[in-house]
C-alpha cells in the first residue's frame, strides 16, 4: 500500500546498492541449452573457451546453479561513481497522456558512456586486468558498448581494440571520437584487417556491416594476439548477469514505496539490458511469488524474437564462434542500416530465448519512424533525450498507457531508459527532416538467411 507521494526521482543510498549479481538460471527449472563447439557439436568446456574469454567470465558464463555472484569491491567502488541510478516517476508523461496508468522508468544514462553498458564493461575489464592480460577486443553497434569499454579499459590501463559496425561508424562519429579519446582503436567493420573481414567484403563489397560481422573480426583479432581476450557487450549470459544491478536496484526502490509493476518493458537487441532489468522480477515469477507482464521490444528491421526461429546458430557472421540456441534470423542476416544501431544483432540471449519459448514473456516489433515519434514526444515532455534503442521501450510504454486511458485501468508500467541520445543527432536529424524510412525484411529474405543454420540434432 502506497502511503505517501512518490518522489519524481527515487534514489537509493550507497548502502543499498547491490553487493551481488543475480544469476536467473538458478531459478529456471528448464535451463537454456548449452553453448556448442562448432566443430564437435558438443557442449563447450571452460578449456575450449579459454583462448577467447577471460577465465573468471567463463565460470560465470557456464554456471547454471549459483544464484548470486559477489561483486568485487573494486567494481563496486567504480559503480559508486554513477550508481545507484535513479528510478523516475514519469509524472509529466502521465499528465500529458491523460492516463490513469502510473509510469516509472529506470534511467541508466547518468555516466559518460551514456548508457547501461558500463555496468558490464567495468566488470569485464576488471577480470581481464586481474588475469594479467594486455588488452581486449570487442565489437560495437551504435557505439554505447565501445564507449563504455574504452572508459573501463582506460581505468585499468588496458589496450582496447573496437570493431564498429560500418554504418554506425559513419552515422555516429561522435561516439567513435569518445572511444578514441579514451584510448581505444576503432575500426569500421567489416574491414581488411582480418581474414574474415576480407572474406565478407569479397562476397558483399557494399555491405554496411552487422554486429555478427564485427564479432567475427574481434574474435579473430583476440585469438591472434598474445595477451588479449575478446569481450562482448550483450547476448552472453555473463553480460546479462552483470546488468542485473539494474533490476535489483529497481526492485529495491519500488519495494521501499510498496509499488508492484504490472508490466515491465525493455528494448531488445542482444538482450542484456532487458534481462538485467527483468531478472529479479522474473525470478519471483519463476518461483511463483508474483506475476508480471514482461514485454521485449525490437525493431521491425531486425525482429529476432517476433520473426526468428528458435534454433542453434552461430553467434557471428564469420561462423567461428560457438553455437548458441536462441531466437535467430540466421548469422548471415545483414539488417538494414537502421538508426537504432544497438538493436541490430541477428540473435537473442539464450536465457531470454528460453523464457520466451516457455511463454513467460512476450515480444513486439516496431517501425523506427514510430520509435522516433515517441522519442521526440518523450524528450519534449520529460526533458530527457532518449537513445533510439531506449525509445523502443518508450513507444510501447506510451501505447500501453493510452490503452489504460481507454479502459480506465490504473496499471503500473515500468520501462528501462537505457541511455541518452546526444550522440545520435544525425539520426534525429533524419527524422526531423522527414527523410527517415522504415524497413521490414520479407519472408523470403529471412528464409534465405536461415538457410545457413547449422544442422544440430
Image (cartoon, rainbow, N blue to C red):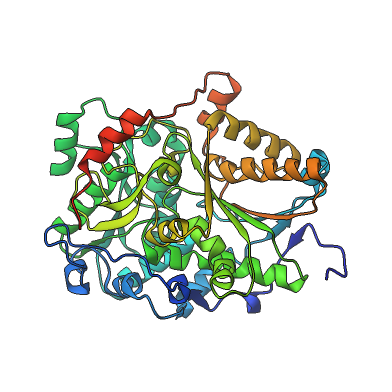
- Residue name at image x 81 percent, y 61 percent: 7
Q: In the image, residue 29 lies at what x, y percent? A: 43, 74
Q: Residue at x 32, y 28 (%)?
A: 444
Where 103 sits versus 228, above or below? Answer: above
User: Is residue 142 visible in this depiction of the protein?
Assistant: no
| Residue 307 pos. (x, y %) | 41, 40
Residue 248 place in picture, x, y as percent: 59, 70
In the picture provided, is 51 more to the left or to the right than 418? left
10 or 132, which lies in front? 10
Q: Nearer the viewer, residue 432 or 281?
A: 281
Q: Nearer the viewer, residue 96 or 18?
A: 96
Asked if residue 435 can be seen in this view, the reply is yes
Q: Is residue 355 left or right of residue 384?
A: left
Quick check: 328 left or right of 396?
Answer: left
Q: Residue at x 18, y 62 (%)?
A: 37
Q: Give the percent coordinates (x, y) of residue 321.
A: 21, 55
Name which quarter of the figure residue 98 lies in.
top right
Quadrant where the N terminus lies? bottom right
Q: Is residue 344 above or below residue 131?
A: above
Q: Specify whether 109 is left or right of 94.
A: left
The C terminus: image quadrant? bottom left
Count up the numbered dots.
Answer: 0
Amino acid at each position: 500500500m502506497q502511503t505517501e507521494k512518490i518522489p519524481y526521482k527515487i534514489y537509493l543510498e550507497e548502502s543499498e546498492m547491490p553487493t551481488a549479481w543475480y544469476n536467473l538460471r538458478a531459478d529456471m527449472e528448464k535451463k537454456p541449452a548449452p553453448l556448442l563447439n562448432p566443430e564437435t557439436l558438443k557442449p563447450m568446456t571452460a578449456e575450449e573457451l579459454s583462448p577467447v574469454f577471460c577465465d573468471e567470465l567463463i565460470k560465470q558464463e557456464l554456471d547454471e546453479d549459483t544464484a548470486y555472484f559477489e561483486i568485487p569491491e573494486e567494481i563496486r567502488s567504480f559503480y559508486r561513481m554513477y550508481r545507484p541510478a535513479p528510478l523516475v516517476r514519469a509524472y509529466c508523461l502521465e499528465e500529458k497522456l491523460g492516463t490513469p496508468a502510473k509510469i516509472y522508468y529506470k534511467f541508466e544514462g547518468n555516466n559518460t558512456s551514456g548508457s547501461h553498458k558500463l555496468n558490464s564493461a567495468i566488470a569485464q575489464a576488471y577480470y581481464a586486468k586481474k588475469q594479467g592480460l594486455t588488452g581486449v577486443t570487442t565489437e560495437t553497434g551504435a557505439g554505447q558498448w565501445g564507449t563504455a569499454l574504452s572508459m573501463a579499459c582506460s581505468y585499468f590501463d588496458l589496450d582496447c581494440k573496437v570493431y564498429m559496425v560500418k554504418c554506425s561508424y559513419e552515422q555516429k562519429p561522435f561516439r567513435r571520437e569518445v572511444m578514441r579519446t579514451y584510448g581505444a582503436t576503432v575500426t569500421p567493420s567489416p574491414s581488411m584487417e582480418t581474414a574474415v573481414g576480407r572474406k565478407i567484403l569479397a562476397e558483399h563489397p557494399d555491405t554496411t556491416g552487422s554486429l555478427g560481422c564485427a564479432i567475427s573480426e574481434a574474435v579473430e583479432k583476440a585469438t591472434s594476439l598474445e595477451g588479449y581476450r575478446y569481450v562482448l557487450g550483450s547476448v552472453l549470459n555473463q553480460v546479462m548477469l552483470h546488468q542485473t544491478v539494474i533490476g535489483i536496484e529497481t526492485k529495491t526502490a519500488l519495494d521501499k514505496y510498496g509499488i508492484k509493476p504490472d508490466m515491465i518493458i525493455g528494448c531488445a537487441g542482444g538482450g542484456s539490458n532487458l534481462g538485467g532489468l527483468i531478472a529479479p522480477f522474473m525470478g519471483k515469477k519463476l518461483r511463483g511469488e508474483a506475476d508480471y507482464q514482461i514485454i521485449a521490444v525490437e525493431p521491425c528491421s531486425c525482429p529476432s524474437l517476433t520473426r526468428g526461429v528458435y534454433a542453434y546458430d552461430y553467434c557471428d557472421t564469420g561462423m567461428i564462434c560457438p553455437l548458441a540456441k536462441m531466437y535467430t534470423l540466421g548469422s548471415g542476416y545483414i539488417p538494414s542500416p537502421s538508426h537504432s544501431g544497438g538493436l541490430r544483432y541477428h540473435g537473442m540471449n539464450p536465457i531470454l530465448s528460453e523464457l520466451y519459448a516457455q511463454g513467460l514473456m512476450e515480444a513486439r516489433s516496431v517501425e523506427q519512424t514510430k520509435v522516433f515519434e515517441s522519442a521526440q514526444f518523450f524528450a519534449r515532455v520529460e526533458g530527457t533525450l532518449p537513445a533510439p534503442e531506449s525509445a523502443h521501450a518508450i513507444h510501447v510504454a506510451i501505447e500501453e498507457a493510452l490503452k489504460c486511458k481507454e479502459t480506465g485501468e490504473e496499471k503500473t508500467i515500468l520501462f528501462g531508459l537505457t541511455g541518452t541520445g546526444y550522440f545520435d543527432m544525425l539520426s534525429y536529424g533524419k527524422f526531423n527532416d522527414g527523410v527517415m524510412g522504415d524497413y521490414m525484411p520479407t519472408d523470403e529474405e529471412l528464409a534465405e538467411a536461415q538457410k545457413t543454420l547449422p544442422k544440430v540434432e
